[in-house]
Image (cartoon, helix red, strand yellow):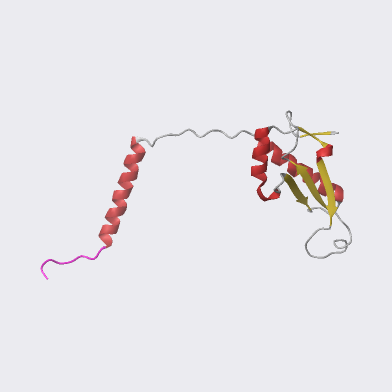
Amino acid sequence: MMISINPEISLDENELNFEFVRSSGPGGQNVNKVSTAAQLRFDAKNSPNLKHDVRERLIKLAGRKVTRDGVLIIHANTYRSQEKNREDALRRLSQLIIEASRVPRQRKKTKPTFASKTKRLESKRKKSKVKEMRKPVFNSSD
């Protein structure tokens, strides 16, 4: 079964590996007995459904969530049920992939305008004058 991320990207469900573990944090009635936290593993580096540039941006975006082998790990333990945590992990993965699929705009180099240079120099002169006025005044007649 395919999971649709956006019109260009769909992931095969076989690429996603879910593991359910016990949630961390303070104890409660079920926290030490029931494995409700979802751990989603997605091999981003070897995924055939991601383009090369999207893959590179995804690995960079995910940061510490990616292992040395290129496996993206998402840990979801917000909810008290396995199914909701599983959905949350899928939602977070799809958000990361959507963000990685956006091509960043190239920055155009610009030079400062004459007016901005003049304004900057004028503010420097004013600041210099203020500091000059703070200095103690010495009388030449002494």
User: Which stretch appears magenta?
Assistant: 135-142
What residue is shown at x 81% (from left), y 41% (from top)? 16
Q: Position of residue 120 (x, y in %)?
A: 34, 44
Q: Is residue 73 above or below residue 115?
A: below
Q: Position of residue 56 (x, y in %)?
A: 65, 38
Horizontal relation, residue 133 to residue 97: left or right: left
Instruction: Tell which of 138 and 73 is nearer to you.
Output: 73
Single out the residue that lies furthest toward the right. Answer: 33
Single out the residue that lies furthest toward the front. Answer: 69
Instruction: Tell which of 41 and 96 is nearer to you.
Output: 41
Horizontal relation, residue 109 to residue 12: left or right: left
Residue 87 drawn in magenta: no
Single out the residue that lies furthest toward the bottom. Answer: 142
Q: Give the tally of numbered discs.
A: 0
Q: Quadrant of the N terminus?
A: top right
What residue is shown at x 75% (from left), y 48% (from top)? 73
Q: Can residue 101 be seen here?
A: no
What residue is shown at x 75% (from left), y 36% (from top)? 47
Q: Position of residue 22 (x, y in %)?
A: 84, 58
Single out the residue that lies furthest toward the left. Answer: 141
